[in-house]
Amino acid sequence: MDTVDLLLHPLRMRIVNVMYDGRTRTTSELCALLPDISKATLYRHIGILADGGLLVVAQEERVRGSVQRHYRLHRARAVIDPDIVAAMPLDDYRRAFAVAMAALLAEFDTYLDRDGADPITDLVGFRQYTLSLTRDELTEMVTELRDVILARTHHEPAPGRTRYLLSPVLFPVSEPGPEPPA
């Protein structure tokens, strides 16, 4: 299975999101982090990701007569090549967006179902802004946002740090209009 097919599944995308912090996790730990997924389903998708090379076994240990595997995300493999993205048909973009939104909705439901969920205290936000930008202004904004986000993706888990899921979505909402008079 290629990387596109591996990642374009809501559950596998959620597993990748959970594993993206670089920590190793057992299947039991993943079950605790994704409580809305049945154990059998989670095991199956972990196996698919491991077979596809996105998850690697970092360690194995014997626990009560069975082998417990500790998985780590192979980050370099968990990215769709830009050339493949450029060649994707529009239906694949539609599918990718639907998968991303399904994964996001499932994560948000899991958050709200947690004991003590407090969107105000946790600074939960979802807003939409409509911007009118030239191509150069758009490129500059995307670069600035990418720089701000990427500067924080290497923060290690630590006391006082909470994992947050950030899902920027950007697309034009209308055809470009005529240039306004000078």
Image (cartoon, helix red, strand yellow):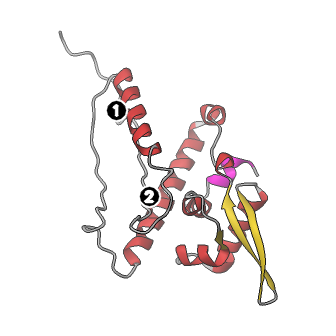
Which three-letter amino acid code belongs to the residue tagged 1? Answer: Ser
Question: What residue do we see at 66% from left, 46% from top?
Answer: 76
The answer to if 38 sits in the magenta stretch is no
- In space, the residues marked 2 and 1 are separated at their CA atoms by 28 Å
The furthest residue to the left: 182
Start-end of magenta stretch: 2-7
The residue singled out by tag 2 in the image is 165
| Dot placed on the residue nearer the N-terminal end, 2 or 1 | 2
Number of marks in the image?
A: 2
Label 2: few (<14), some (14–19) or many (≥20) C-alpha neighbours in 10 Å = few
SS category of the residue bearing label 1: loop
Q: Main secondary structure of the magenta part?
A: helix
Q: Position of residue 31 (x, y in %)?
A: 59, 77
- Asked if the residue at tag 1 contacts the one at tag 2, i.e. Cβ–Cβ closer than 8 Å, the answer is no
Question: What residue do we see at 29% from left, 22% from top?
Answer: 177
The residue singled out by tag 1 in the image is 174
Q: Position of residue 16 (x, y in %)?
A: 60, 59
User: Does residue 34 appear anywhere in the picture?
Assistant: no
Q: Is residue 9 left or right of residue 53?
A: left
SS category of the residue bearing label 2: loop
Which three-letter amino acid code belongs to the residue tagged 2? Answer: Leu
Q: Position of residue 84 (x, y in %)?
A: 66, 35
Question: What residue do we see at 75% from left, 54% from top?
Answer: 53
